[in-house]
Image (spheres, rainbow, N blue to C red):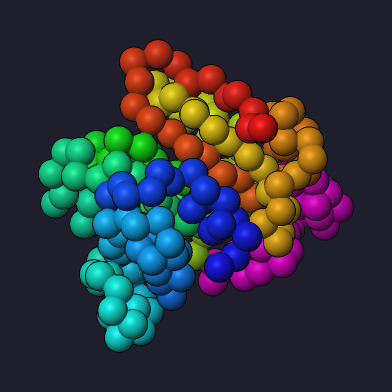
């Protein structure tokens, strides 16, 4: 697994029910099932990845976050995971709402468009930047809703979600040393990882230990 996937796995309690949206090659699902004893299943839009996962005995269905989550009942899962996909869905706010309807917790990871390299390249060239994470030209990219860590926190506050845990990670998935500062994380974090739950009060961004 990627290091960020190991961090996600560390947020999930053993023996719980998990839905992994955009499960890809199924490595996280396999780990949660074998190591953590979770009732883990996935949704994947790429039919080749679905076929590969099913061939390895993993319960993965063909589908996508924008159209298929509404068919799940309330509180069907303990955790719903969205890995590096938030910026690629058509309706990110609605997807988050569905995740926290069908799951008691949501775990969301996404590339941070507020990273200093992206800001600098945009300022210097006046063109949409490309990096190792944002590696596709603007006219071909699946990343139709890029956001920053501060943008995501604003959405959490507006929707009333509680941030139970958050961290900024570098390209390799390692935790960033300045993760306790939201503004520094927004400037230097290449990726962000959030653990959310429903709540009537505004979310608070408390750092991890």
Q: Residue 181 versus residue 141: which sits nearer the camera? A: 181
Q: Which image quarter: residue 99? A: top left
Place residue 197 in its image quadrant. Answer: top left
Farthest residue toward the right?
A: 124
Residue at left offset 52%, top offset 48%: 10
Along the horizontal axis of the image, is 9 left or right of 125? left
Against 23, residue 102 (above or below) is above
**Residue at (54, 58) in percent of width and height:** 5
Query: Can residue 197 be found in the magenta stretch?
Result: no
Give the residue drawn at x 32%, y 49%: 15
Q: Quadrant of residue 126?
A: bottom right
Residue lying farthest to the top in this orientation: 201
**Residue 122: in magenta span:** yes
Which quarter of the rendered picture does the C terminus lie within?
top right
Judge left or right: residue 162 versus residue 111: left
x, y percent for residue 81: 40, 51
Q: Quadrant of the N terminus?
A: bottom right
The range drawn in magenta is: 113-141
Q: Nearer the viewer, residue 144 or 125?
A: 144
């Amino acid at each position: 697994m990627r290091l960020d996937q190991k961090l996600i796995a560390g947020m999930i309690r053993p023996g719980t029910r998990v839905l992994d949206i955009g499960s890809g090659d199924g490595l996280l699902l396999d780990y949660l099932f074998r190591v953590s004893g979770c009732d883990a299943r996935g949704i994947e839009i790429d039919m080749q990845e679905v076929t590969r996962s099913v061939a390895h005995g993993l319960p993965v269905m063909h589908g996508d976050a924008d159209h298929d989550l509404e068919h799940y009942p309330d509180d069907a899962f303990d955790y719903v995971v969205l890995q590096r996909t938030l910026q690629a869905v058509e309706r990110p706010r609605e997807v988050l709402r569905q995740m926290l309807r069908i799951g008691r917790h949501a775990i969301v990871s996404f590339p941070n468009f507020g990273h200093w390299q992206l800001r600098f390249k945009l300022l210097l060239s006046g063109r949409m930047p490309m990096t190792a994470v944002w590696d596709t030209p603007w006219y071909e990219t699946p990343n139709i809703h890029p956001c920053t860590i501060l943008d995501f926190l604003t959405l959490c506050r507006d929707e009333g979600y509680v941030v139970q845990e958050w961290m900024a990670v570098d390209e390799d998935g390692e935790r960033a040393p300045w993760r306790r500062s939201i503004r520094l994380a927004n400037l230097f974090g290449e990726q962000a990882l959030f653990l959310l739950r429903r709540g009537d009060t505004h979310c608070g961004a408390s750092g991890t230990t």
